[in-house]
Image (cartoon, rainbow, N blue to C red):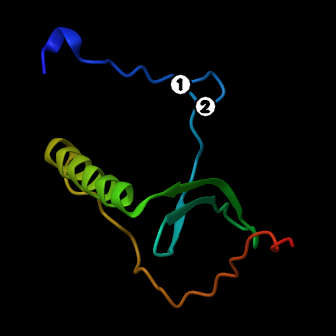
């Protein structure tokens, strides 16, 4: 395609979204048609946490997101060293996780 005829996508970042949203836990669920990422903030000493953002992606975009994240982590670690993770991920950890009740 002629470069002069390529369409350029413009992406807007609003003032409200610009600061970002803090999250230190992500819960991921999926169905045959979508992946759901719930970004959660857990604060020390509290027994309740809140979903700060929910993102829903198609399986194709979830896979692209995973690859982009892996690529960015690799580049980050090349510049800054290995990212250390503390403790072990325990999939059996007791977390009560529920959303709003379905409505008829």
Q: Which mark is residue 21?
A: none
Residue at position x 39%, y 70% from top? 86
Image x and y of residue 21, in percent: 60, 43
Quadrant position of residue 93: bottom right
85 or 28, which lies in front? 28
Image x and y of residue 17, in percent: 60, 31
Looking at the image, residue 5 lies above or below residue 77: above
Image x and y of residue 36, in percent: 54, 64
Q: Which residue is mark 1?
A: 13
For this view, does 15 lie left or right of residue 9? Answer: right
Near mark 2 (Cα within 10 A), the count class, few <14, some 14-19 or many ≥20, is: few
Task: For the residues labelled 1 and 2, say whether their Cβ atoms are less than 8 Å apart.
Answer: yes
Quadrant position of residue 89: bottom left
Q: How many marks?
A: 2
Please identify the residue farthest to the top as the structure is shown. 4
Looking at the image, residue 68 lies above or below residue 35: above
Please identify the residue farthest to the right as the structure is shown. 104
1 or 94, which lies in front? 1
For this view, does 23 lie left or right of residue 68? Answer: right
Question: What secondary structure is found at the residue carrying circle 1?
Answer: loop
Image x and y of residue 52, in percent: 66, 53
Q: Which residue is mark 2?
A: 17
Near mark 1 (Cα within 10 A), the count class, few <14, some 14-19 or many ≥20, is: few
Question: What secondary structure is found at the residue carrying circle 2?
Answer: loop
Quadrant showing the N terminus: top left
Real-space CA distance between mark 1 and mark 2, rounded to the nearest whole angstrom: 6 Å
Residue at position x 29%, y 54% from top? 64
Residue at position x 75%, y 68% from top? 46
Please identify the residue farthest to the bottom as the structure is shown. 92
């Amino acid at each position: 395609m002629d470069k002069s005829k390529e369409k350029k996508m413009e992406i807007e970042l609003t003032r409200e979204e610009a600061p970002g949203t803090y999250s230190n836990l992500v819960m991921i669920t999926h169905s045959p048609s979508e992946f759901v990422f719930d970004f959660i903030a857990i604060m020390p000493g509290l027994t309740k946490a809140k979903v700060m953002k929910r993102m829903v992606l198609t399986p194709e975009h979830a896979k692209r997101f995973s690859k982009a994240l892996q690529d960015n982590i690799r580049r980050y670690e090349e510049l800054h060293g290995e990212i250390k993770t503390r403790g072990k991920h325990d999939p059996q950890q007791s977390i009560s996780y529920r959303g709003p009740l379905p409505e008829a």
